Image (tube, grey):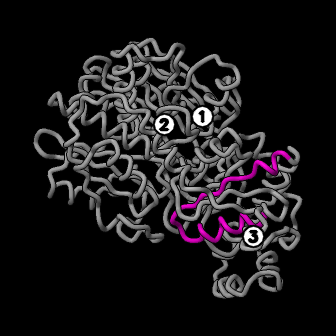
Amino acid sequence: MDYKKIYEQWLSNDFFDQKTKEELESIKDNEEEIKDRFYQELKFGTAGLRGKVGAGTNRMNIYTVSQATYGLAKTIEEYGQEAKDRGVVICYDVRHGSDEFSKVTAEVLAGYGIKVHIFKDIQPTPVCSYAIRKLNAISGVMVTASHNPREYNGYKAYWEEGSQILEETADKILNHIKEIDDFSQIKKVDFDKALDEGLINWIDESLIEDYINDILSKTINEEIDKNINIVYSPLNGCGNKLVRRILKERGFNNVHVVKEQENPDADFTTVGYPNPEDPKAFKLSLELAKKVDADICLATDPDSDRCALEVKDDNGKYHFLTGNKIGALMINYILSQLDKNNEIPENSYVVKSIVTGDLPKPICNKYNVKLKETLTGFKNICAIANEFDKTHEGVFLYGFEESIGYNYGDFVRDKDAVNSAMIISEMAAYYKLQSKSLLDVLNELYEEFGYYENDVISIVLEGADGQAKIARIMDYVRNNPLEKVAGLNTQKIVDYLKDDTGVQKSNVLKYYLDNGVWFALRPSGTEPKIKLYINAIADSEEKSKELLKAIENEMRQIIDSVE
């Protein structure tokens, strides 16, 4: 149906609330805005829903959330009464609409006789994963848009293992969503009524105590400098309470919180774009760090599943470390310390995504730990842990990806910034006792294994036209293979959409060049971006950086040339 007709239906249908109608009325003279809100339905996939908050089929609102939850409810019904009784865990973060969307989700699930376990307050994403496993729930929903701009919110769906749904479950949910052509068909039970009837239940605080204790059980070393000076910012998200608590219980008492970013703020007024992958997010942290002479600065994203890091050098200057560098440091620390204590479990695995840098490979080889690669996203990384639960063929030791997501252990089946903040702090404190910074340790790794320079270049292309251009870029690069890039020969091209790679199909192209150098191109699954990943290796830092820049420049020219 034409987007304009759908817009007019929303305006004229008495089912939609007055606030929605007033919002739509306010854009009646803005054709582009109407088109963007109604040219498609907000797509439900393995990342669930994610979009701007507002009225329209291509927006996050109580109606699109209800529709997604209907699909989830009908999928759960397929597994019978036991699955309905096991119920669904619901968590939410600080964003606009999160509280309301979580309650609507609970009301729809209750409408289909499905038990709900819901938190009374905001919680980090890893707590949702943990609670699913702890409560033996059939599923879970985390209402969050992670690190997206403030205009966004989202709806992550999880399955019984505690990891986000994979394609098979997403397809089932989507097929049920397609059954709904009238939002008024969706059943609901009023939240308070469902609470009284026992269909909706508040989650007991004891679960958080268990979560904290399980993280503390991952402590590796007590011979550390617990006086290490730490600056922490939750970036106005939901990490404040639990990150501070885990650091305190671990014995770190010299922790300084960025006051302006301590409390929840759905507008992220102090930071703008609340993505700690971007060094700009550390502006206020660095101001505080210089005042207190901090050794490290930690920052977590709004739903506190991702953790970023800045490290002070010998001259008092702070350096931002990418997710590739942090992940490699953590792998080296965990494996070296477990090895020293003879505590590496037999048949252990480190798992990373196909677009994450390769420095972990020689580190894992050194300690005889297997390294496994999978598609981008922790749903795929933790799918390996889920498989090991069934086959007992391996032990999931550590998982990470370049987008500052890490997880040590398997009691959470998602990336976990609370856990990571503790391990990073312990790691920095261990090396500080040896008069080393994490920069010193990183340079030691480069000296031993070669200089690995990595980068992720994100090109933002918004709206329907942007999505179409991203598709054209992928088609062009797919159909016009490059024989040479930055003076290096192409050794192999892997097309994860068409080739048999041993993992599920995905729109990713990866070029393997001479000397272990590679780059990959993929559209983001959660943002209007196309991403270029580069892994450059050389025998010096200067050469590896030059090589990375040369590949970036050449690929940018190709991307820019696509009309």
Label 2 amino acid? Asn
Label 1 amino acid? Cys
Label 3 amino acid? Asp
| Residue 503 circle label | none
Q: Count neighbours of disc 2 (C-alpha within 10 A) and say few if under 14, some if 14 to 19, many if 20 or more.
A: many
Q: Secondary structure at mark 2?
A: strand
Q: Secondary structure at mark 3?
A: helix
Q: Which residue is denoted by mark 3 in the rendering?
A: 196
Find out whether the residues at labels 1 and 3 contact each other: C-beta distance under 8 Å: no
Above or below 502: residue 307: below
Q: Count neighbours of disc 1 (C-alpha within 10 A) and say few if under 14, some if 14 to 19, many if 20 or more.
A: many
| Quadrant location, the N terminus | bottom right
Residue mark closest to the camera, 3 vs 2? 3
State which quadrant residue 268 falls in: bottom left
Q: Which residue is denoted by mark 1 in the rendering?
A: 382
Judging depth in this view, the residue of 218 and 93 nearest the camera is 218
Give me the residue at 23% from left, 56% from top.
286
Above or below 479: residue 281: below
Q: Range of the magenta residues?
A: 82-108
Q: Earlier in the sequence, mark 3 or mark 2?
A: 3
Judging depth in this view, the residue of 504 and 549 nearest the camera is 504
Q: How far from the left and from the top, in percent, is residue 309? A: 32, 45
Find out whether the residues at labels 1 and 2 contact each other: C-beta distance under 8 Å: yes
Q: Earlier in the sequence, mark 1 or mark 3?
A: 3
Q: How far from the left and from the top, in percent, is residue 543? A: 28, 27
In this rendering, would 427 be left or right of 46? left
Q: Is residue 354 magenta?
A: no
In this rendering, would 542 be left or right of 117? left
Q: Which residue is denoted by mark 2 in the rendering?
A: 407
Q: Alpha-carbon distance for marks 3 and 2?
A: 38 Å
Give me the residue at 88% from left, 46% from top.
80
In this rendering, would 83 be left or right of 396? right
